[in-house]
């Protein structure tokens, strides 16, 4: 039970992150928030085109967090429904000890 909760909690947090980025992107499109060029550190970290903007970066981060959310929820459900945990070795978010 504990292991599936360990996977579920980050999945729930990442759901909220995706929701927050979705709301931010709506505001960016409907308000006076400036869509300025993305900071160099963000472009370097995500290895993105140099002309990316704040909006582009927010979309990339939102998509990445959606992937994390899905992996964590999948992991939690899988742990809950099976005793075979060998699949955890294939998931890159699972810490190696
Ligand atoms: Fe994440």
Image (cartoon, rainbow, N blue to C red):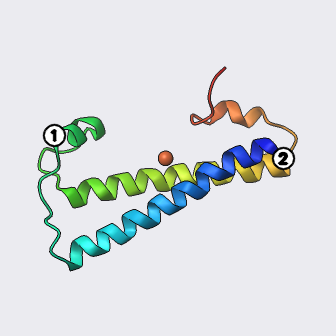
Q: For mark 1, what is the residue?
A: 40
Q: Residue furthest bottom?
A: 30
Query: Residue 30: where, in percent of width, then height?
Result: 22, 79
Q: Secondary structure at mark 2?
A: loop
Judge the density around disc 1: few (<14), some (14-19), many (≥20) Cα neighbours within 10 Å: some
Q: Is residue 30 left or right of residue 13?
A: left
Q: Answer yes or no: do the residues labelled 1 and 2 have beta carbons within 8 Å?
A: no
The front one of 34 and 67 is 34
Q: Residue at x 58, y 54 (%)?
A: 70
Tally the marks.
Answer: 2
The front one of 77 and 7 is 7
Q: Residue at x 23, y 70 (%)?
A: 28
Q: Residue at x 49, y 56 (%)?
A: 66
First along the sequence among labels 1 and 2: 2
Q: Secondary structure at mark 1?
A: helix
Q: Is residue 95 left or right of residue 76?
A: left
Relative height, residue 24 to residue 79 (above, below): below
Query: Residue 90: where, in percent of width, then height?
Result: 64, 33
Query: Residue 7: where, in percent of width, then height?
Result: 67, 46
Judge the density around disc 2: few (<14), some (14-19), many (≥20) Cα neighbours within 10 Å: few
Q: Residue at x 24, y 57 (%)?
A: 56
Q: Is residue 3 left or right of residue 16?
A: right
Assign the C terminus to one quadrant of the image: top right
Q: For mark 2, what is the residue?
A: 1
Relative height, residue 40 to residue 81 (above, below): above
Query: Residue 26: where, in percent of width, then height?
Result: 30, 74
Separation (CA) of disc 1 from disc 2: 43 Å
Q: Residue furthest top?
A: 97
């Amino acid at each position: 039970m504990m292991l599936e909760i360990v996977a579920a909690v980050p999945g729930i947090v990442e759901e909220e992150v995706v929701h927050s980025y979705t709301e931010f992107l709506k505001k960016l499109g409907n308000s006076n928030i400036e869509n300025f060029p993305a900071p160099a550190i963000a472009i370097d970290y995500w290895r993105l085109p140099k002309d990316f903007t704040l909006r582009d970066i927010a979309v990339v981060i939102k998509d990445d967090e959606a992937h994390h959310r899905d992996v964590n929820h999948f992991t939690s459900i899988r742990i809950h429904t099976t005793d075979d945990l060998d699949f955890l070795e294939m998931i890159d978010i699972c810490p190696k000890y």
